Amino acid sequence: MPVTIRSRLLLLVLSVLLPGMLGVAWLIASTFEAERNAHERNLRDTARALSMLVDGELSRRAAIAHVLAQSPALDAPAPLDEDKRLAFERLARRAMQGLDGWIELRAPGRLLLSTRLPEGSGGESAGPATLSASPIMLPLQSSGPSSAGEAQEPHAAWVEPVMRNGSLLYNLVVTVRPSELQRLVQAQAPHPGWIGTVMDSRGRLVARLPGGASFVGRQGSADLLERMAAEREGAFQSVSLDGRPTAGYFSTSALGWSYVSAMPREEFAGRMPQAVQRVAVGALVLLALAMAGAVWVSRRIERPMRSLKRLAQDLQAGRPVEARPTGMAESDEVAEALVSAGRSMTSARAELERSVAEAVERTRQVEQRGAQSQRVVALGRLTGGVAHEFNNLLGVISNSMHLMQRHASAAELQGPLSATQRSVDKGSQLTQHLLRFAGKRPVRVQTLSLARYLPEVQELMRSVLGRRIAIQVQVPANVWPVRVDVNELDLALVNLALNAHDAMPSGGELRLRACNAEAADKEGMPNLAPGDYVLLTVSDDGMGLAPSLVEHAFEPFFTTKAVGQGSGLGLSQVHGFATQAGGGARLASTPGVGTTVSLLLPVAGNSPDQTTPVFDDVTQQSIAGITVLLVEDDEALGDVTAALLMSHGARVLRAGDAGAALRLLEDGAQADVVLSDVVMPGPLDGVALARRLREQRPRLPVVLITGFNNAGIADGEFVTLRKPCAPAELLGALQALITAARIAHPSPLAGHKP
C-alpha cells in the first residue's frame, strides 16, 4: 500500500517523539509503582515491628511463668500449706511489679491463689476441672465474673504447667490485659489514618489503633482471616471493620497471634506528583506542535513531486521531456536526470535485451543443475529406505547367530557361523556406504581448519596416487574452519584420489583447492541452508566423462569400469558425506581435459561436537530377571531380538509401535527398561516415545536403536545404538542403564510412575 510524503513525515515525527512519550509514560508508571512499593515495604516493616514488640511482651509473661514454675514452694502437691502458699504469692507479686495483669495458681477444680485478689486471700473452688500438660498461650478471654463475683475484664494468658517427678501438679497462669498491648500499638505510632491491629490465635482483636477498647473482642474480616489461615504473612486488600477499603500487610508469629498494619486503599494506590504532571502536559503539547509542522512541510514538498510525476508520464509515453524549475534543488536535479534518461533509453533497451538473453541461458543451466541435484536427493532417500530395511535383516541374522552360538551344539557350527558373521560385517559396511549416500549415517563431527588439514592429508593421498601423479595444494590462511566428520572427509578424498588415479594412467596432476564460497559457487544447489560455506575442489587432468555420464556419477553402484574392477560407491560416498555435513557436491567434467569435484562444506559454528556413547563389553554381567519393553515394528527382527533377550534370562514385553507401548504401560504393565527402534509407523517415532516416557516416567530408562543419523536427538539426551547392533553391545547398554537407574533410584523401578 503506497504511503504519501505527508504520512511519512508524520511517521518520522512520531518515531522521534514517541520514544520520549513512552519515556514519560514509563516515568509516570514508575512513580506510581515506586510509591506503591514504598507503601508496601512500610506496611510490612510496621507489621513486623509490631510483631516483635508484642511477641517480646508475651515472651516476658512466658519467661515469668517458666521461672515461677520452678519455685521450691510448689514442690508439694495440693493443697499447699499456708506458709508455702503465702511465700509463693509474695514471689509472684514481686515478679509482676511494673506489669499489668495478674498471676493465678490453679489445681484441678480449684483456684489456689490470684495476685489480683488482696494479699493473703485464700483459694477458691473456681479452677478448671482439668489442667494443661504443656505451655500454651490462651487467646482473648471473654468478660465474665471472677471467682470472687466481681466483673473480670477481657484478657489473654500464658499457661505454664508445674511438673514434679513427671507428674502434673498445677497450672501457673500469667495474664496480659489488652490495654498493655494497646499501649504498644500506640507506641509504634503508625501514620495518621493508618490502622494497627493485634489479633489472637482465634482471629479476635486484642488491640487496635484507632478505636482501642471499642474493637477488643471483635472478629476480624472474614476474607483476611481466610488469607491468614493459608499463609504466615503477606500483603492483602480488604474492607476494615469500620467500613473503609484498605490495603495492608499481616504477619503471624509462632504463638499464632497476628499483627496487621493497613492504610486507606486510595492512599496506597499513590498520587501523581505535580512535576510529573507538568512533564506529561508538556510532552503532549510538543507532540501536537510537531505534527502541525510536519503537515505544513509536507504540503511544500508535494507540489514538486507532482511536477516530477508529470515528467515521468511524458517519458513513459515517449513525449519530449522539458524540465521546469520547481524551487526545490533536489526536485530540479531529478528532472534533469529524467531528461538525460530519455536520451539514453534507446541504447539501454538494446543492452537490456542482450542481458536478458544471457540471464535466460544462465537460468537454463541452473535449472539443469537443480534438476540433477533433486534427482540425486530422491535417489538418496530411496537408498536410505533400502538400507534401513537391510539393516533390519542384518539385525535378524546377527541376533539369530548369537542365539545359535549359545546352543549346546554350537561347536559343530563354528565354520558356518564365522562365515555368517563375516557376511553380516560386510553387509553392514555396504549399508553404511548406502547411508553415506543418503546422508543418514551416524556421524561424529568436529571443527577442522582446512589450512592445516589439506597439507597434512597429502601423504595419505600420495600413497593412493603413486609417484607419477603430482599433488598441488592451494589453501589461503584465511579460509574459514568447517565442521565435518574427519574420517568421512578422509574417505571422500581417498575415493576421489582413486578415481583420479584410474583417470590418469600415464600420470598427471591432482589439485586440491579450498576457498571461502561466494554466491556464484552456491548456484545449482537449491537445498543448501542459508549461511556461509567453504568451497573444496579436487581436480585432475584425466580422461574426463561424457555429459551423458556426468548426471549419473553420484548414483550408488554406477561405474564406468569393467565388472569386478569397481564398486560404484566411491562418488556416492563423496555425495553422502557432503550432504550429511549440511552442504552439497557437484561434478564437472570435460572429455580429454579432466574432472573437477566441488564440495560445499558449512562453516563451523559454536555448537559442541557430537559424542557417541560407548559401552564396555559387559557380557559377563547379567540381565536375568529384568523386564524389557521391546518396541519394534519389524516382526521378524522383533521375534529374534526378543529370543536373544529371553536367552539371557530377561522377560520381554512386545509392542509394534509407540502407541501400543504407551497403552501397555497405562494398563499396568511393569518394565525395567524400554528398547525401541527410532523409525516406526504412526504419529510417534522412537524419539517422541522416549521423550513422552521421560515426562511421564522419568525413572524408566530408554535405549534407542537405529541405522540412521540421530538427527533430532540432543547430545546425550538418550542412549542410541547403531543398527545392526552386536548382541554384546546391546546387552551391555541395557545392563549399564539398569545399574545406573537403580543406583539413582534405590526403590523399585518397574512400571513406576511418579
Image: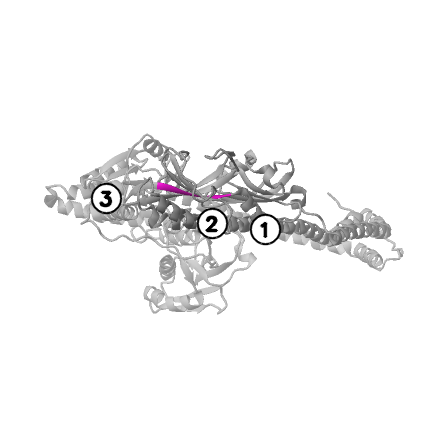
State the residue position of label 2: 96
Q: Amino acid at mark 3?
A: Ser
Tag nearer the camera, 1 or 2: 2
Image quarter (top left, top right, bottom left or bottom right) of the N terminus:
top right
Q: Nearer the viewer, residue 157 or 654?
A: 157
State the residue position of label 1: 188
Q: Residues within 10 Å of mark 3 (few under 14, many from 20)?
A: many
**The magenta stretch spans residue 710:** no
Q: Residue at x 55, y 37 (%)?
A: 224
Disc 1 versus disc 2: distance between alpha carbons?
Answer: 24 Å
Tag nearer the camera, 3 or 2: 2
Image quarter (top left, top right, bottom left or bottom right) of the C terminus:
top left
Boundaries of the magenta span: 170-176
Main secondary structure of the magenta stretch: strand
Residue 555 showing in the rendered view: no
Element carrying mark 1: helix
Q: Nearer the viewer, residue 598 or 221?
A: 221
Which label sits on residue 623?
none
Element carrying mark 2: loop
Q: Amino acid at mark 2?
A: Met
Which label sits on residue 398?
3
